[in-house]
Amino acid sequence: SMTEANIHANGADMRAWPAMTSWNTGSVYQVSVAGVQAHPLHFHVNPFQIVGMPNATYGSGFFQVGDFHDTLLLTDLVASDRITIRMNTDRFTGQMFVHCHI
């Protein structure tokens, strides 16, 4: 959990957290995500493209298949709905941060 106490437990900060995964520069990754009806998904550094959703558009057309975003919140979904996103890791070679944007 990203509480102030957990982030700074034992004098640490988020830089001490282990990586969730490693992605190679110059690659395209496709990921299926769930939970974006309640928690906004946010990627730092690289925007992602929406490539699959239960409907072609949400948010009065703001979120559409094919669009690029860095934050995704679709309150019209249910918890079991999945969204497929695609990201090109083209240039950045450092650490990237992904989190719920609440």
Image (tube, helix red, strand yellow):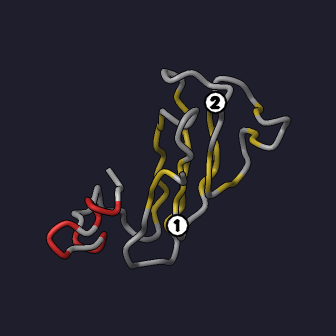
* Image mark for residue 7: none
* Image mark for residue 53: 2
Secondary structure state at the residue bearing disc 1: loop
- Residue that badge 1 annotates: 44
Above or below — where is 31 with respect to 78? below
Residue at 48% x, 46% y is: 30
Amino acid type, callout 1: His
Residue at 27% x, 73% y is: 13
Q: Are marks 2 and 1 in contact (CB under 8 Å)?
A: no
Residue 41 is situated, as x and y percent measured from the top left of the image, at 53, 48
Is the residue marked by circle 2 packed among few (<14), some (14-19), or many (20+) residues within 10 Å?
A: some
Q: Nearer the viewer, residue 70 or 2?
A: 2
Q: Nearer the viewer, residue 3 or 23?
A: 3
Residue at 27% x, 61% y is: 5
Amino acid type, callout 2: Met
Find the residue positioned furthest to the right: 60
Residue at 21% x, 74% y is: 12
Q: Answer with left or right where residue 51 lies relative to residue 12.
A: right
